[in-house]
Image (cartoon, rainbow, N blue to C red):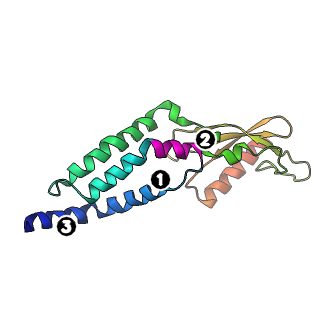
Amino acid sequence: DEKIAIMREKHSALMRPVVFALDHVCSITAAPAETPHETWFQQTYGDAIKSALERLKNPANPANPASSWLPFKQQIMMSLQQRAQKRASYLLHLDEISPRLVSMTTTEMALPGEASASDAVTIQSVGNTVTILPTKTKPKKLFFLGSDGRNYPYLFKGRQTDLSSHLGLKISHVKAFL
């Protein structure tokens, strides 16, 4: 009996960071969905996340921590990895991830990067397709429809320093000039 208690304590100590992270994911997933994509995620993975968290907190076999981790790995991680590897996952529909942006039409907002505010082209609407480029930082590409009727592509990059974004802006200005 004491041996089982020691094994449970070791399991708890070993899995504490995983349980903490998964508990945070579970609390986020349990929040009311704000977009259709969040609703889909909750319906698809919500129960599996709760079940995995419960198995990690109360393992059937504390002597074997991998046995409580295996169902999570099989149910959720494999599914997410397969989805990430599919080509279709590189295209998202904006109305599923941000209905607010899709509803934004005929604004007074100038297109980003426009030089002159007086005769600037404004944003008429935002394109419904977001392309995730398959590179290390996974930049997102989307189009704005300008008040002049033209589509303007924009690339949104994450994890970028101010220096590199400033450099990118300067390069795009030089290209526009050429």
Residue 138 appears anywhere in the view = no
Horizontal relation, residue 107 to residue 54: left or right: right
Q: Residue 103 lies in magenta, yes or no?
A: no
Callout 2 environment at 10 Å: few (<14), some (14 to 19), or many (20+)?
some
Q: Identify the main secondary structure in magenta.
A: helix
- Which is in the foreground here, disc 3 or disc 1? 1
Q: Quadrant of residue 106?
A: top right
Labels 1 and 2: the sequence-earlier one: 1
Where, quadrant-wise, is the N terminus in this rendering?
Answer: bottom left
Residue at the spot of label 2: 96
x then y, percent, for residue 25: 43, 56
Horizontal relation, residue 109 to residue 96: left or right: right
Q: CA distance from mark 3 to mark 1?
A: 28 Å
Amino acid type assigned to the residue bearing label 1 in the image: Thr
- The one nearer the camera, 122 or 42, is 42
Q: On screen, 32 above or below 142? A: below
Magenta segment boundaries in residue numbering? 35-43
Labels 3 and 1: the sequence-earlier one: 3
Residue 9 - label: 3
Q: On screen, 147 above or below 10? A: above
Amino acid type assigned to the residue bearing label 3 in the image: Glu
Amino acid type assigned to the residue bearing label 2 in the image: Glu
Residue 29 - label: 1
x then y, percent, for residue 82: 40, 35
x then y, percent, for residue 69: 27, 50
* SS at badge 1: helix
Q: Quadrant of residue 65?
A: bottom left
